[in-house]
Amino acid sequence: MKRRVIVVTFVFSALLVSAGHSFFRALTSGESLTASASKYLSTLDKKQLAKSTMAYDSEKRVDWHFIPKDHRKGLQIKEMNETQRKAALALLKNCLSEVGNDKAIKIMELEKVLAEYEKDRKGGNIRDPERYYYTVFGEPKADGKWGLSIEGHHLSLNFVIEKNEVISSTPQFLAANPGVMMSAAAGVKKGQRVLADEELVAFELVNSLSDEQKKQAIIAKKAPREIRAAGAAQPPADEKVGIRVGDLTDEQKQTIRKLVSTYIRTAPEDVARQRVEEILNSNIDDIRFAWAGPTKPGVGHYYRVQGEAFLVEFVNTQPDAAGNPANHIHAVFRSMSSDFALPAK
């Protein structure tokens, strides 16, 4: 048992290193977030502060969603001056790893693509890369407990920091429309694929399964339209379904570790390691992989990976803004015990 834990730890660590995490970070993520949130708030005027701050126990703290909305909690980037924007983007950068920050920035930039495709939309165009909102809950200080939300269309990042330690970094939601840029638009190159591994590694895994394994893993012929419990404060508590990790071959186990690591490594290195430790302290063999829909691109498909500690859900069923089928991704990483630092149900 000890040898297996060491091997799995090594595999996850190697994947995190390859994702560009730094092992020489001067501050912990909690310290960096506290400092950068304080700096961000210090740039705001009184009116902006009223928009960008709420009490920690506000019901809005657990009010999250990724759909396009006319109004959201918080202060929009478009309402900030250049100094404030720099501080806001620095705060975003401290929320994520290098690879995670790159994904978040590209997700925001895809709003320009949607704006171009939907320029004749009735009722006006709401696509805007500056319509991302910042909210700080409570006071960011070293000995306190506070929360952070950075959210807009297709992006929702949520944190709780207590005594300079990140105690919750979920829900973590990222999405992409188009999933793959079929042609260049709005300055975004053809072929860009923001959430590439989230999709490609899953296809690699499901298509490596034997016919007998597929009987366990494939839970439906048609993919659901959306992830479960979208916008809910806590993840769904349904029983795990699909094939057990313990029933996979060694090569397939490597693939599912790579898939889960894709979500883990969105976070800064120390937060990612916390996530890995939580997984290692659970029953790894009983983590389940489930698939719904066809096992080829271009047709609606869905998967989830669920263990005692975490839940990953991915769906790609909607057409992109240009009408290409199944090219609109929604992907979420959740904690089964501490979304928003709330106790499990």
Image (cartoon, rainbow, N blue to C red):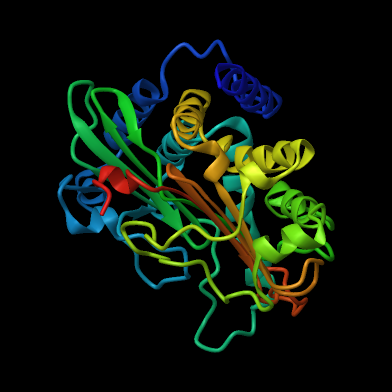
| Residue furthest bottom as drawn | 122
Residue 80 drawn at (x, y percent): 40, 48
Q: Is residue 30 above or below residue 156?
A: above
**The image quarter in which residue 34 lies:** top left
**The image quarter in which residue 29 lies:** top left
Q: Is residue 26 above or below residue 239?
A: above
Residue 196 drawn at (x, y percent): 74, 50
Q: Is residue 332 above or below residue 227?
A: above
In the foreground, 303 or 78: 303
Residue 324 drawn at (x, y percent): 78, 76
Q: Is residue 122 above or below residue 154?
A: below
Decide if residue 187 is in sight here.
no
The structure residue drawn at horizontal position 18% and vertical position 21%, both measured from the top left corner, is 143
Left or right of 237: which side holds 42? left
In the foreground, 27 or 227: 227
Residue 221 drawn at (x, y percent): 69, 77
The structure residue drawn at horizontal position 60% and vertical position 59%, both measured from the top left corner, is 242
